[in-house]
Image: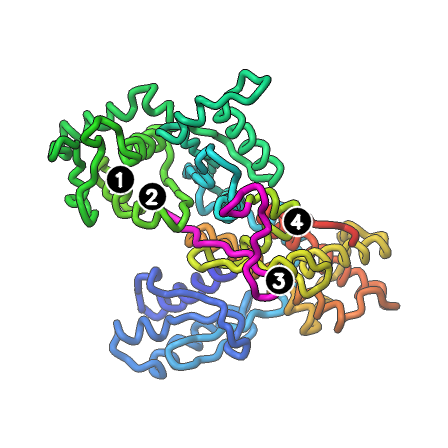
Amino acid sequence: MIRDEIKKIIERAMNNLGYYHNMSQIIVVTPENKSHGDYSTNVLFVISKNFKQSYNEMALILKPEIEKEKSIIEKIEVLGGFINFFVSKEYLQKQAVEILKKKEKFGDLKIGEKQKINVEFISANPTGPLTLGNGRGGFCGDALSNVLEKAGYEVTREFYINDQGKQVEDLKKGLYKGEKRTALQIQKENQKFITRKLKIKFDNWFSQKNLYKNKEVDKVLDYLRKKKLIYKKEGALWFKSTKFGDDKDRVLIKKGGDYTYLASDIAYLKNKFDRGFDKLIYFWGADHHGYIGRMKATAKALGYKKGQIDFIIMQMVRLLEKGEQVKMSKRAGTYVALEELVDEVGLDAARFFFLIRSSGAHLNFDLKLAKEKSQKNPVYYVQYAHARICSILRKSEIRNPKSETNLKLLTHPGELSLIKQLIRFEEIIEDTSKDYQVQRIPQYAIDLAESFHKFYKNCRVLTDDKKLSQARLSLILATQIVLKNTLDLMGISAPEKM
């Protein structure tokens, strides 16, 4: 990955000059202002403090040493405490070749090699249809799981079935006419049917009820009791969660003898780690924000490290049409059923629109735009780019580049700009696997589609120059590979015709 290569160049230059430094403080980023280069590093800002020299003094020493590296860099420029890198066209041409070689494996990383992650998402009560909130967590959880697998992690996608408690007991009593199945069984089957329909994959459906059936809740309470982390007060059993950073102690068993949700949540957390997971990721609705403190306290009390458990809170979703909130559900009453929305706008549009905003921000879902079949609709715009590439390849009757293709002919700014976008894909995988910001993926898809459309406008693909045509066909084939890989991460189709 080019950011890693640039960091290695900086480290070698510093070592050659005797400036040994912790490289973890030095970052390489893509600047928003293109005049600041393809990549920028804060190296001068960091080391000038340590070595008590000005930015300019450090630049005069370090810049010539970095410039000795010719394999990647075309030129570098100094701006304040930053060094800006401009990537050479030779390096970019080689990267296009790598994409053509790796195909669907392009973007496969080894960040999470030999690490197991449990991603729990949706986890809705089986007492009604899946809602828009469930859909947001479902699509984001599915996409993040895809990214983590691409980054090399071994991922288990888990649905936690909330099949314990009074609401569930009441649901069990209801039998559908002519059937031996209870209403609870019907709802569980419906949830599985709908998630399959929405192409949301789960590896494991875990029953809360089994935590009680297998005595796991009682066992974990015994463990806490032995550690003197629980006590009785006012007839209830309490967990000393404040000892581990929570804002107040929590009830585990109520005065009447009923277990709280936290009791089973503690057992469930321990169950996951007992299954050998290195990290747990929870997708929760906005109403669960207050549970984070107690769960972090739980993990700490059980002896797990801070970095082994992460929470992603999904904010609310509103349906809008012409700026007004829409209530399109007839059967669901106070909320919109997810299945109804997907039937209305299509699965691809639903997935894209749910993914495009940060999970921490409220999502206004533009119903009219999602249904529009024009390039104003971002998912249509991205899919159209893929379909156009497929059309060009069909017309040229070239689907695989020839070994003698000379990609050194790709020197036009539009060609080089497109390659720069293509190689960002690996960075998207790396960054998203670390911070879980899945909205980065649809935005990247839009940026890549835009780069392709600009390239196509400025660079005629099929020309009288057969060698140049072959090189450009190879470039758009590389673009098709990366664009499809990106759509696959989101669970969105890559149409060949539109």
Q: Which residue is mark 1?
A: 299
Question: Percent x, y for residue 144?
Answer: 49, 47
Which mark is drawn over residue 446? 3
Q: How many marks?
A: 4
- Mark 2 and mark 4: span between their CA atoms? 36 Å
Q: Which residue is mark 4?
A: 344
Would residue 488 be found to the left or right of residue 67 on screen? Answer: right
Per the image, label 4 sits on a secondary structure element best described as: helix
Q: Which residues are magenta?
A: 310-336
Quarter-of-image position of residue 268: top left
Per the image, label 1 sits on a secondary structure element best described as: helix
Q: Which residue is mark 2?
A: 309
Question: Dot 3 surroundings within 10 Å: few (below 14), some, or many (20 or more)?
Answer: some
> Which is closer to the viewer, label 2 or label 4?
4
Residue type indicated by callout 1: Ala
Residue type indicated by callout 3: Ile
